Image (spheres, rainbow, N blue to C red):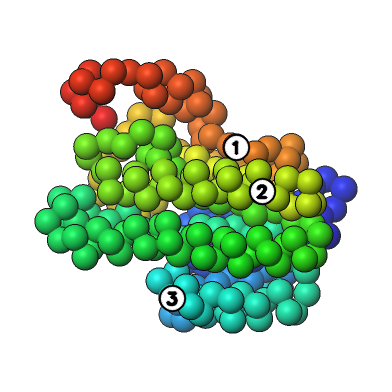
Amino acid sequence: MKDAFGIPQSLLVLGGTSEIALATARRLITRRTRTVWLAGRPSPALESAASGLRELGADVRTVGFDALDPDGHEAALGKVFAEGDIDMVLLAFGVLGDQSRDENEPGAAVRVAQTNYTGAVSSGLVCARALQTQGHGSLVVLSSVAGERARRANFIYGSSKAGLDAFAQGLGDALYGTGVHVMVVRPGFVRSKMTEGLAEAPLATTPEAVATAIETGLRRRSETVWVPGTLRVVMAALRHVPRGVFRRLPL
């Protein structure tokens, strides 16, 4: 169960090597989270991530999980919930893709969509049902500001995040009143390995800043969190820019 300050005592991360997820796990461990499950493809990176969190004093376990294998989600995630209640699930996996390549290789574009959207729908529903059976818990979904309005520069990734965002909002509405809280997190450009080499966008942020925003959102039981917060205002304006003007903006 969460403590009096809204901090989960147990955490399940879907996408166990995500920099944002690990920054969030580290922050929550320092705030009293004691059990962490890292779900991801078995790899040295996953084991290294688990080892690093153990050094902070948490009981950290790993479980094999592949976003692209929805048929295996029920069994993989069922093992985790069979071990005890989970106070928070952080859905943090995703791929950026390569826009110029993906436009010319439909199979690669489909892989981005299947990872970011289809895999999230499958695993999100499995976890939501388990949390509802418990009668408590939070599902935190890492979306992106890119999903707010498709840009020419990354519309394949952006469209997959738009679908994820809409799904998470609808799931939150479906679970309202059940004791399960769904929170959608919309970071802007995050300085990480995934974005290394890309031109930095205005209002860029860091995994640690996103982790701080997630903790604050949990305490407040927020439904939507923007990182940084000023993006809420920026996107409210951009959402209404005429399409002919929007396509000419240097975004």
Quadrant, the N terminus: bottom right
Three-letter amino acid code at the position of disc 2: Ala
Q: Are marks 1 and 2 in contact (CB under 8 Å)?
A: no
- Of the numbered discs 1 and 3, the one sitting upstream in the chain is 3
Q: Nearer the viewer, mark 1 or mark 2?
A: 2
**Residues at marks 1 and 2, CA–CA distance in whole angstroms:** 16 Å
Q: Residues within 10 Å of mark 2 (few under 14, many from 20)?
A: few
Badge 3 amino acid: Asp
Q: Nearer the viewer, residue 186 or 136?
A: 136
- Could you tell me residue 54's position as x and y percent? 65, 72
Question: Residue extending furthest front?
Answer: 174
Q: Which numbered dot is residue 174? A: 2
Which secondary structure lies at badge 2?
Answer: helix
User: Residue 104 in the image: x percent, y percent?
Assistant: 12, 56
Q: Nearer the viewer, mark 1 or mark 3?
A: 3
* Left-right relation of 113 to 56: left
Q: Is residue 126 above or below residue 136?
A: below
Q: Which residue is mark 1?
A: 224
Q: Which residue is mark 3?
A: 69
Q: In which image quadrant can residue 193 be found?
A: bottom left
